[in-house]
């Protein structure tokens, strides 16, 4: 694939995530809808994965796998694959049930690209923790607000990209939260056994 076309795809997708994060109605038109672009979109969370690992190392309770950097990276990498499989599998099942599977690739693309603003809103928190200006306990209420904001724009994206009612989009966000929390609990359980 030619470089110019890839750069246009990146630019279009970044504009789409900005518009989604601002709850703008034209955001869904920014995301592609092909299988190839959906596969390429998985590079976004993979490239952001080191930032996730850094956040894990900085978290107050990061003793997964005995604290070994290699074990933490392996376990979180496996968790990422499990989250993708379970979440996108559940969304495909839901989309097929309401006759919206033709929009599934666009949902995958938008979901993967939404890792960019979701990561960006948490960078100030990481900076405040690293600089020592605030403690984890002081930042926790702010983190809860940021998490609720990411849930809101994820639900907005699901409703608009899949062309489904808000209630079903909220359920998709709930499914994502359950998958995320369930795999995190499993990761900690496995990490304690190692």
Image (spheres, rainbow, N blue to C red):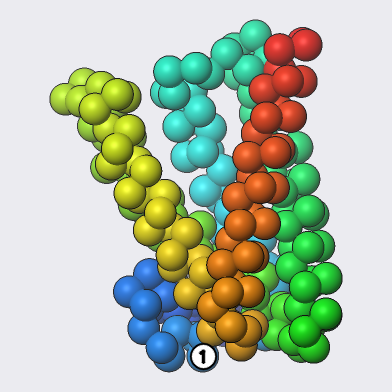
Quadrant where the C terminus sits is: top right
Q: Quarter of the image holding residue 38?
A: bottom right
Q: Answer with left or right where residue 66 lies relative to residue 51.
A: right
Q: Residue at x 58, y 61 (%)?
A: 173
Q: Which residue is mark 1?
A: 29
User: Residue 182, image x and y in percent?
Assistant: 70, 38
Which is more toward the observer, 138 or 45? 138
Q: How crowded is the residue under tag 1: few (<14 C-alpha within 10 Å), some, or many (20+)?
A: some
Q: Secondary structure at mark 1?
A: helix
Q: Answer with left or right where residue 33 lies relative to residue 23.
A: right
Q: Residue at x 71, y 78 (%)?
A: 105
User: Residue 37, image x and y in percent?
Assistant: 68, 76
User: Residue 176, image x and y in percent?
Assistant: 64, 55
Quadrant where the N terminus sits is: bottom right
Q: Is residue 112 visible?
A: no
Which is more toward the observer, 132 or 141? 141
Q: Answer with left or right where residue 78 lies relative to residue 170.
A: right
Which is more toward the observer, 48 or 158? 158
Position of 32 relative to 173 (above/below):
below
Position of 120 relative to 194 (above/below):
below
Position of 3 relative to 172 (above/below):
below
Position of 155 relative to 159 (above/below):
above
């Amino acid at each position: 694939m030619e470089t110019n076309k890839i750069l246009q795809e990146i630019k279009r997708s970044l504009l789409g995530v900005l518009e989604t994060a601002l709850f703008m109605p034209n955001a869904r038109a920014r995301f592609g809808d092909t299988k190839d672009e959906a596969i390429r979109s998985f590079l976004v969370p993979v490239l952001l994965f080191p930032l996730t690992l850094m956040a894990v190392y900085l978290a107050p309770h990061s003793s997964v796998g005995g604290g070994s950097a290699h074990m933490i990276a392996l376990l979180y990498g496996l968790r990422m694959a499990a989250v993708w499989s379970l979440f996108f599998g559940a969304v495909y099942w839901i989309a097929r049930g309401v006759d919206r599977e033709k929009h599934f690739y666009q949902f995958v693309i938008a979901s993967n690209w939404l890792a960019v603003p979701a990561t960006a809103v948490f960078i100030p928190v990481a900076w405040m923790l690293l600089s020592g200006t605030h403690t984890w306990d002081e930042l926790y209420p702010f983190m809860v607000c940021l998490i609720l904001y990411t849930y809101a724009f994820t639900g907005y994206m699901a409703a608009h990209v899949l062309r489904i009612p808000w209630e079903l989009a909220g359920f998709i966000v709930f499914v994502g939260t359950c998958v995320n929390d369930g795999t995190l609990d499993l990761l900690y359980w496995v990490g304690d056994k190692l």
